[in-house]
Image (spheres, rainbow, N blue to C red):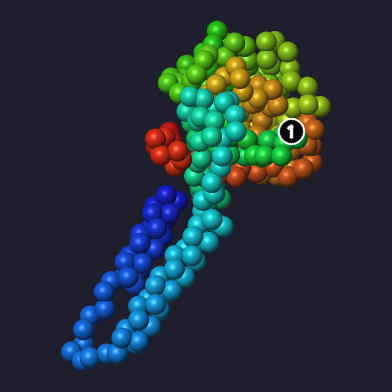
Amino acid sequence: MTPLELFGLICLFAVVRVAISLRPPVSAGRSDSSATSATTVLREYLDAFIVAGLVALFLITFVVRTFYIPSGSMEPTLQIHDVLLVNEFEYRFFPPHHGDIVVFEPPIDSSNDFIKRLIGAPGDTLRIQNGIVYRNGKALNEPYEEQKPNYNLQIRNYNIYVDGQPLDPTFANIPPKSAWSAPDRIPNGYYFMMGDNRNDSEDSHIWGFAQTSGDFASGPLKGKPAHFTGHAFLIFWPPNRIRILH
């Protein structure tokens, strides 16, 4: 069962339970007092709200959270003031996938989590040339892209090179050579993230790799815990923006 199926099953349980609790009482063939009837209805409503509250608490704690979009770095996919549902359950059991829109702890000082699209995963080669992103030698089809990147980039020689210059590990999260399986392939546990609004996004071409777990390898947060918060899967506010994210 996938995380989304589990989420749907829990929601279905809540709806069915509430529906059962709120159905009209069935006559047993005898006359009951109005006080008893009112008490029974009140208990049914209370039971339904308790169950719904427990389900909501479980979902908020273990499965989903809401996130508010404060900037335009993911335009046009995500607009300023969009409110998202983020599945916190999925990455506890399944690895992130190419194209996922991920909420994560950035490797730089920030009071908030970042949200970007996962472009490069462990074992991938990656380069950007003349505005085109190439992963494992193949040009990506990116209909979600607001604008093509105005910089060239390549992962090589155990680093991320932007316009021919390597990122400085003092300011970017670059793992040591011992963590790499090859000088041009993303190391295990590390991910290359990009905003859809490519030239207005503080992302991996500036601060290096994101990490699913462990401690940041270098940069301003070196030695501090890293994690992926979850997978953003739905815009649910404002109403005219409701849609499943791809």
Residue at x 36%, y 68% (from the top left corner): 17
Q: Is residue 18 left or right of residue 200?
A: left
Quadrant for the C terminus in the image: top left
**Secondary element type, mark 1:** loop
Could you tell me if residue 2 is visible in this image?
no
Q: Nearer the viewer, residue 72 or 145?
A: 72
Residue at x 70%, y 26% (from the top left corner): 207
Can you give x and y, in whole percent of width and height, for residue 189 in the image?
A: 63, 38
Q: Which residue is mark 1?
A: 108
Q: Residues within 10 Å of mark 1 (few under 14, many from 20)?
A: some
Residue 124 figure quarter = top right
Looking at the picture, which amino acid does disc 1 mark?
A: Ile
Above-or-below relation of 62 to 246: below
Can you give x and y, in whole percent of width and height, for residue 118 in the image?
A: 54, 31
Outermost front residue: 34
Can you give x and y, in whole percent of width and height, for residue 101 in the image?
A: 52, 35
Above-or-below relation of 155 to 24: above
Outermost top residue: 130
Residue at x 70%, y 10% (from the top left corner): 164
Q: Nearer the viewer, residue 150 or 192?
A: 150
